[in-house]
Image (cartoon, rainbow, N blue to C red):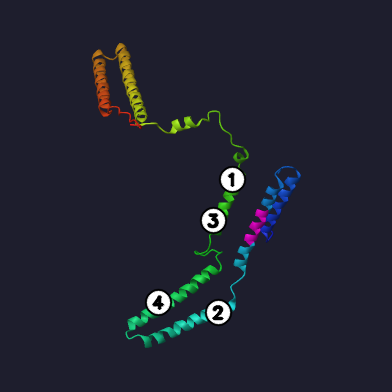
Amino acid sequence: QIQQTDCKVELVYQWIQQIVVENVKMQVLSVPPPILTRAFQELSNGMVKYHDAMVIAHVPFPFPYMQTSEILLILHWVFTPLLMCTWTVAWPWTFSFCFISVLFLWSLNAVACELENPFGEDPNDLDALHAQNHLNQRLLLLLRPSTFRTPKLSEQATLYEMKLVEAHTKSSLSDVWSDVQVETVKSLEERANMSLDQAIACNSASRSSVSADRCRLSKERTAETLKAVLNEDLQSTPSSPKRIDPGG
Protein backbone atom coordinates (compact mmCIF):
# COMPACT_ATOMS: atom_id res chain seq x y z
CA GLN A 1 0.00 0.00 0.00
CA ILE A 2 2.80 2.43 0.76
CA GLN A 3 4.35 1.82 -2.67
CA GLN A 4 1.12 2.78 -4.42
CA THR A 5 0.44 6.08 -2.67
CA ASP A 6 2.01 9.45 -3.46
CA CYS A 7 1.89 10.72 0.13
CA LYS A 8 4.21 8.18 1.76
CA VAL A 9 5.33 10.46 4.59
CA GLU A 10 1.81 11.37 5.63
CA LEU A 11 0.76 7.73 5.52
CA VAL A 12 3.64 6.59 7.73
CA TYR A 13 2.94 9.47 10.11
CA GLN A 14 -0.68 8.35 10.43
CA TRP A 15 0.41 4.74 11.03
CA ILE A 16 2.78 5.79 13.82
CA GLN A 17 0.08 7.80 15.54
CA GLN A 18 -2.36 4.92 15.22
CA ILE A 19 0.13 2.43 16.70
CA VAL A 20 0.83 4.72 19.65
CA VAL A 21 -2.90 5.18 20.39
CA GLU A 22 -3.58 1.43 20.16
CA ASN A 23 -0.70 0.61 22.52
CA VAL A 24 -1.94 3.18 25.00
CA LYS A 25 -5.34 1.48 25.06
CA MET A 26 -3.70 -1.92 25.61
CA GLN A 27 -1.56 -0.52 28.46
CA VAL A 28 1.66 -1.21 26.55
CA LEU A 29 2.71 2.43 26.78
CA SER A 30 2.04 2.93 30.47
CA VAL A 31 3.71 6.34 30.71
CA PRO A 32 2.44 9.58 32.27
CA PRO A 33 0.26 11.72 29.98
CA PRO A 34 2.72 14.66 29.81
CA ILE A 35 5.43 12.39 28.38
CA LEU A 36 3.03 10.89 25.83
CA THR A 37 1.88 14.38 24.85
CA ARG A 38 5.49 15.36 24.24
CA ALA A 39 5.87 12.38 21.90
CA PHE A 40 2.90 13.52 19.79
CA GLN A 41 4.30 17.05 19.81
CA GLU A 42 7.66 15.88 18.47
CA LEU A 43 5.90 13.97 15.70
CA SER A 44 3.92 17.05 14.71
CA ASN A 45 7.09 19.19 14.76
CA GLY A 46 8.71 16.73 12.36
CA MET A 47 5.77 17.03 9.97
CA VAL A 48 5.98 20.83 10.13
CA LYS A 49 9.67 20.74 9.19
CA TYR A 50 8.91 18.31 6.38
CA HIS A 51 6.29 20.63 4.88
CA ASP A 52 8.68 23.58 5.18
CA ALA A 53 11.21 21.64 3.10
CA MET A 54 8.49 20.75 0.60
CA VAL A 55 7.68 24.45 0.19
CA ILE A 56 11.30 25.21 -0.65
CA ALA A 57 11.43 22.36 -3.19
CA HIS A 58 8.07 22.90 -4.91
CA VAL A 59 7.41 26.66 -4.76
CA PRO A 60 9.60 28.29 -7.45
CA PHE A 61 11.32 31.64 -7.20
CA PRO A 62 9.18 34.47 -8.68
CA PHE A 63 9.67 34.36 -12.42
CA PRO A 64 9.50 38.16 -13.09
CA TYR A 65 12.15 38.81 -10.42
CA MET A 66 14.48 36.19 -11.92
CA GLN A 67 14.05 37.49 -15.49
CA THR A 68 14.63 41.08 -14.41
CA SER A 69 17.83 40.12 -12.63
CA GLU A 70 19.20 38.33 -15.69
CA ILE A 71 18.31 41.21 -18.03
CA LEU A 72 20.08 43.70 -15.76
CA LEU A 73 23.15 41.47 -15.63
CA ILE A 74 23.28 41.27 -19.44
CA LEU A 75 22.98 45.07 -19.73
CA HIS A 76 25.76 45.48 -17.20
CA TRP A 77 27.92 43.02 -19.17
CA VAL A 78 27.36 44.99 -22.42
CA PHE A 79 27.82 48.57 -21.17
CA THR A 80 30.66 48.02 -18.71
CA PRO A 81 33.43 47.74 -21.39
CA LEU A 82 32.16 50.89 -23.15
CA LEU A 83 32.29 52.94 -19.97
CA MET A 84 35.63 51.51 -18.86
CA CYS A 85 37.22 52.61 -22.14
CA THR A 86 36.43 56.25 -21.31
CA TRP A 87 37.78 55.97 -17.74
CA THR A 88 41.03 54.14 -18.41
CA VAL A 89 43.98 54.79 -20.72
CA ALA A 90 45.56 51.35 -21.27
CA TRP A 91 43.61 48.33 -22.48
CA PRO A 92 44.93 45.95 -19.74
CA TRP A 93 43.28 48.09 -17.08
CA THR A 94 40.05 48.16 -19.10
CA PHE A 95 40.03 44.37 -19.41
CA SER A 96 40.84 43.85 -15.73
CA PHE A 97 38.14 46.16 -14.39
CA CYS A 98 35.49 44.76 -16.77
CA PHE A 99 36.36 41.14 -16.01
CA ILE A 100 36.36 41.60 -12.23
CA SER A 101 33.07 43.49 -12.01
CA VAL A 102 31.21 41.19 -14.41
CA LEU A 103 32.58 38.04 -12.77
CA PHE A 104 31.61 39.29 -9.31
CA LEU A 105 27.95 39.94 -10.19
CA TRP A 106 27.47 36.80 -12.27
CA SER A 107 29.01 34.70 -9.49
CA LEU A 108 26.50 36.06 -6.99
CA ASN A 109 23.69 35.21 -9.43
CA ALA A 110 25.01 31.64 -9.88
CA VAL A 111 25.20 31.12 -6.11
CA ALA A 112 21.62 32.34 -5.72
CA CYS A 113 20.47 29.89 -8.42
CA GLU A 114 22.18 27.00 -6.60
CA LEU A 115 20.59 27.96 -3.28
CA GLU A 116 17.15 28.34 -4.84
CA ASN A 117 16.47 24.58 -4.60
CA PRO A 118 18.98 22.65 -2.45
CA PHE A 119 17.17 19.32 -3.00
CA GLY A 120 18.19 17.26 -5.99
CA GLU A 121 21.00 15.20 -7.49
CA ASP A 122 23.40 17.99 -8.42
CA PRO A 123 26.88 18.06 -6.84
CA ASN A 124 26.03 21.18 -4.81
CA ASP A 125 22.68 19.86 -3.51
CA LEU A 126 22.07 18.31 -0.12
CA ASP A 127 22.80 14.58 0.10
CA ALA A 128 19.28 13.50 1.05
CA LEU A 129 20.01 9.83 0.31
CA HIS A 130 22.88 9.75 2.80
CA ALA A 131 20.73 11.45 5.43
CA GLN A 132 17.95 8.91 4.87
CA ASN A 133 20.35 5.96 5.12
CA HIS A 134 21.79 7.44 8.31
CA LEU A 135 18.30 7.68 9.81
CA ASN A 136 17.41 4.14 8.70
CA GLN A 137 20.48 2.73 10.44
CA ARG A 138 19.40 4.35 13.73
CA LEU A 139 15.86 3.03 13.37
CA LEU A 140 17.05 -0.49 12.53
CA LEU A 141 19.24 -0.40 15.62
CA LEU A 142 16.11 -0.08 17.75
CA LEU A 143 14.66 -3.22 16.17
CA ARG A 144 17.57 -5.50 17.10
CA PRO A 145 16.84 -8.15 19.76
CA SER A 146 19.72 -6.89 21.91
CA THR A 147 18.00 -3.51 22.37
CA PHE A 148 14.99 -5.11 24.07
CA ARG A 149 17.15 -6.40 26.93
CA THR A 150 17.87 -4.02 29.79
CA PRO A 151 21.62 -3.95 30.54
CA LYS A 152 22.68 -5.08 34.02
CA LEU A 153 25.91 -5.19 35.97
CA SER A 154 27.69 -8.52 36.01
CA GLU A 155 28.66 -10.28 39.22
CA GLN A 156 32.34 -9.61 38.55
CA ALA A 157 31.80 -5.85 38.43
CA THR A 158 33.80 -3.75 40.90
CA LEU A 159 31.52 -1.56 42.99
CA TYR A 160 34.18 0.20 45.06
CA GLU A 161 35.76 3.36 43.81
CA MET A 162 39.18 2.75 45.35
CA LYS A 163 39.49 -0.64 43.65
CA LEU A 164 38.67 0.94 40.31
CA VAL A 165 41.32 3.59 40.85
CA GLU A 166 43.92 1.01 41.85
CA ALA A 167 43.07 -1.14 38.84
CA HIS A 168 43.72 1.64 36.33
CA THR A 169 46.37 3.81 38.03
CA LYS A 170 49.54 3.33 40.06
CA SER A 171 50.32 5.24 43.23
CA SER A 172 54.04 5.80 42.55
CA LEU A 173 56.92 4.99 40.23
CA SER A 174 58.12 2.17 42.47
CA ASP A 175 54.80 0.33 42.02
CA VAL A 176 55.16 0.51 38.26
CA TRP A 177 58.77 -0.66 38.49
CA SER A 178 57.82 -3.62 40.70
CA ASP A 179 55.37 -4.77 38.03
CA VAL A 180 58.12 -4.55 35.41
CA GLN A 181 60.43 -6.65 37.58
CA VAL A 182 57.72 -9.29 38.10
CA GLU A 183 57.21 -9.56 34.34
CA THR A 184 60.97 -9.88 33.82
CA VAL A 185 61.23 -12.68 36.38
CA LYS A 186 58.31 -14.49 34.75
CA SER A 187 59.98 -14.33 31.33
CA LEU A 188 63.23 -15.68 32.81
CA GLU A 189 61.38 -18.53 34.46
CA GLU A 190 59.67 -19.43 31.21
CA ARG A 191 62.97 -19.54 29.35
CA ALA A 192 64.56 -21.64 32.12
CA ASN A 193 61.66 -24.09 31.99
CA MET A 194 62.05 -24.41 28.23
CA SER A 195 65.77 -25.15 28.63
CA LEU A 196 65.06 -27.70 31.37
CA ASP A 197 62.55 -29.45 29.13
CA GLN A 198 65.17 -29.67 26.42
CA ALA A 199 67.68 -31.20 28.89
CA ILE A 200 65.12 -33.78 30.05
CA ALA A 201 64.35 -34.68 26.47
CA CYS A 202 68.07 -35.10 25.86
CA ASN A 203 68.42 -37.44 28.88
CA SER A 204 65.60 -39.63 27.66
CA ALA A 205 67.12 -39.72 24.21
CA SER A 206 70.52 -40.72 25.60
CA ARG A 207 68.98 -43.67 27.42
CA SER A 208 67.38 -45.01 24.27
CA SER A 209 69.38 -44.63 21.06
CA VAL A 210 71.27 -41.35 21.03
CA SER A 211 74.92 -41.49 21.92
CA ALA A 212 76.23 -40.12 25.19
CA ASP A 213 78.60 -37.67 23.51
CA ARG A 214 75.82 -35.98 21.55
CA CYS A 215 73.71 -35.72 24.72
CA ARG A 216 76.60 -34.19 26.64
CA LEU A 217 77.18 -31.59 23.93
CA SER A 218 73.48 -30.73 23.93
CA LYS A 219 73.56 -30.28 27.72
CA GLU A 220 76.57 -27.97 27.50
CA ARG A 221 74.97 -25.85 24.77
CA THR A 222 71.74 -25.62 26.74
CA ALA A 223 73.58 -24.55 29.88
CA GLU A 224 75.58 -21.93 27.98
CA THR A 225 72.44 -20.56 26.30
CA LEU A 226 70.60 -20.33 29.61
CA LYS A 227 73.57 -18.61 31.25
CA ALA A 228 73.86 -16.08 28.41
CA VAL A 229 70.13 -15.29 28.52
CA LEU A 230 70.18 -14.78 32.28
CA ASN A 231 73.24 -12.52 32.08
CA GLU A 232 71.69 -10.51 29.26
CA ASP A 233 68.42 -9.98 31.12
CA LEU A 234 70.16 -9.10 34.37
CA GLN A 235 72.39 -6.57 32.64
CA SER A 236 69.48 -5.00 30.79
CA THR A 237 67.43 -4.70 34.02
CA PRO A 238 68.49 -1.52 35.88
CA SER A 239 68.36 -1.16 39.59
CA SER A 240 65.06 -0.44 41.27
CA PRO A 241 64.32 3.31 41.50
CA LYS A 242 63.92 4.94 44.82
CA ARG A 243 60.49 5.85 46.07
CA ILE A 244 59.85 9.56 45.94
CA ASP A 245 58.33 10.96 49.08
CA PRO A 246 55.57 13.46 48.07
CA GLY A 247 55.73 15.21 51.43
CA GLY A 248 59.51 15.74 51.24
Could you tell me if the residues under marks 2 and 1 are in contact, i.e. CB atoms within 8 Å?
A: no
Query: Residue 152: percent from the left, percent from the top?
Result: 58, 34
Image position of 248 (left or right of 25)? left
Q: CA distance from mark 1 to mark 3?
A: 17 Å
* Amino acid marked by disc 4: Ile
Front label number (4 vs 3): 4
Which disc, if any, is residue 141?
A: 1
Residue that sits furthest to the front in the current view = 248
Which disc, if any, is residue 130?
A: 3
Residue 78 seen in this snapshot? yes
Q: CA distance from mark 1 to mark 4?
A: 53 Å
Query: Residue 11: percent from the left, percent from the top?
Result: 69, 56
Callout 3 crowding tier (Cα within 10 Å): few <14, some 14–19, many ≥20: few
Residue 1 seen in this snapshot? no
Q: CA distance from mark 4 to mark 3?
A: 38 Å
- Read off the residue under disc 2: 67
The quarter holding residue 195 reads top left
Callout 4 crowding tier (Cα within 10 Å): few <14, some 14–19, many ≥20: few
Sequence-wise, the earlier of marks 2 and 4 is 2
> What span is in magenta?
41-50
Give the quadrant of the C terminus.
Answer: top left
